[in-house]
Amino acid sequence: MVTKVKNKFYITTPIYYVNDQPHIGHAYTTIVADVLARYYRQKIGKENVYFLTGTDEHGAKVAESAALKNISPQKFTDQISQQFKDAWQNLAITNDDFIRTTESRHQKIVVNILNKLKAVKTPAGNEVLYETDYEGLYCVGCEKFILESELVDGKCPDHNKEPEQVKEKNWFFKLADYLSIIQQKIESDELTIYPKARKNEVLGLIKQGIPDFSISRSKKSVPWGIDLLWDKNQKAYVWVDALSNYITALDYPKGKLYQKFWPADIQLMAVDILKFHTLYWPAILLALDIPLPKILAIHGFFTINGQKMSKSLGNVVHPDELVKEYGAEVTKYLILSQFSFGSESDIKVEEFPNKYNADLVNGLGNLVNRITKMVEEYLKGKIKIDDLENISLKIGTEEMIEQLNFKEALFKIWARIQDCDTAIDQDKPWILAKSKNIKDQEKLKSVLGKYIKDLYIISINLKPFMSETAAKILKIITASKIKKPATPLFPRK
């Protein structure tokens, strides 16, 4: 699977639910999106890349949380949504837009989408939206109906609470009439689900049979949300409202952004919302006659030092804490270099200090100091490097980034750093510098020039991950007089 594109790149994160503060799981998805956005801006131009994130702000849980704080739902969502905005700013995330489902621009288009769906018939000739009585178990924490077979000791496994027994009349989406079409598109990879294990998981869900899903709830059950125009007793429920953000942010259906950037090239998410994005979302798009996204990329759950992340355990890691300790770029490096995209992953926060010192202080930072000090001392900072921009920059990182293998991409960069260190030890420029032999002096210039080229290659490949660090190195090595940095790139901790 590759995310290779030609003329435009549209990437989305899920919109994060405002029931809690941003944590490292939210940060991971957003960091991945940021790296891809930076990479493609470098490759196809800033104007051809669009990166969307945001917050999901409707539902019963929001109303309940606001009531507990004795404030309005809108004020509550304003506060939490701002925390996400601040967290992404602190992490130097370069999103082009931040969509909120309480914004009028979103709500107006959702009303339009709901009305369109109300008028559509499925390929089998049924109404896409139909009204029926529903009785089932509902978990407020999950904001979804839950099957009895999913319970553990009678409780929701994610929230450890018994679900409520709910019986009410709702509007439903006729998902059954679209499942065979979706299955065909997934099997043929017209709709690519990555990694393959998640694709197989979705196909397994289809074979088991997925019930139609509710697109509304009664106002008594869910007072905080968008009204259905044709049924004033109902509020839009979660999925049409939330999932539509990916096109409302582009001003669907006639906006210039929509015309340029849809379909999405890649949509990122965690596995807990797999079903909704791989089945509900394509069905909604098919009903609206809208092209499907190209790739749905799904990563696993995270544990922290081997334990499930939980408030009760006190091990929830907030990105702001890491940024305060390490800075934005180092935080992103430490997270992305620890594990591969797609699998269940354990974030070993206790290993961050050692990795920081080994990879950045003693690795990249020391190499920059080492090379620039030699150029400054042995050649008085003057070295002639021809055609830096025309040298080959390929060390395998492009392929790895396009395959979402960020850990391997970083490994290739650090392998080049180690190779350069090894070359210095073998070439022994300090011995050449002492020689008065003309050939030795020419060789000195040659090997130091090669090291500068290595730093250039490393910096260009590092840009999507650590753009400020890359820019600092490039400024140092392209100066008219090269000097060792007055302060280390990465201070020892």
Image (tube, helix red, strand yellow):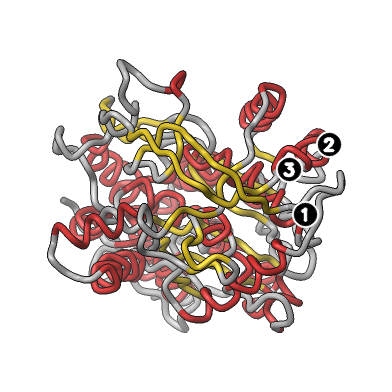
Please report contact status of discs 3 and 2: CB closer than 8 Å, yes or no. Answer: no
**Secondary element type, mark 2:** helix
Of mark 1 and mark 3, the one earlier in the sequence is 3
Of the 4 image quadrants, the one containing the N terminus is: top right
Please report contact status of discs 2 and 1: CB closer than 8 Å, yes or no. Answer: no
C-alpha gap between disc 1 and disc 3: 16 Å
Q: Is residue 338 visible?
A: yes
Instruction: Between label 3 and label 2, give the one nearer the viewer.
Output: 2
Instruction: Name the residue that disc number 1 marks.
Output: 286
Amino acid type at image mark 2: Gln
Q: Is residue 394 left or right of residue 438?
A: right
Q: Is residue 272 left or right of residue 394?
A: left
- Residue 55 in percent (x, y) is at 41, 63
Q: Which mark is residue 184?
A: 2
Instruction: Between label 2 and label 1, give the one nearer the viewer.
Output: 1
Of mark 2 and mark 1, the one earlier in the sequence is 2
**Secondary element type, mark 3:** strand
Amino acid type at image mark 3: Thr
Residue at image coords 82%, 41%: 181
- Residue 136 in percent (x, y) is at 45, 32
Q: Nearer the viewer, residue 17 or 257?
A: 17
Instruction: Between label 1 and label 3, give the one nearer the viewer.
Output: 1
Residue at image coords 71%, 55%: 293
Instruction: Name the residue that disc number 3 marks.
Output: 192
**Secondary element type, mark 1:** helix
Amino acid type at image mark 1: Leu
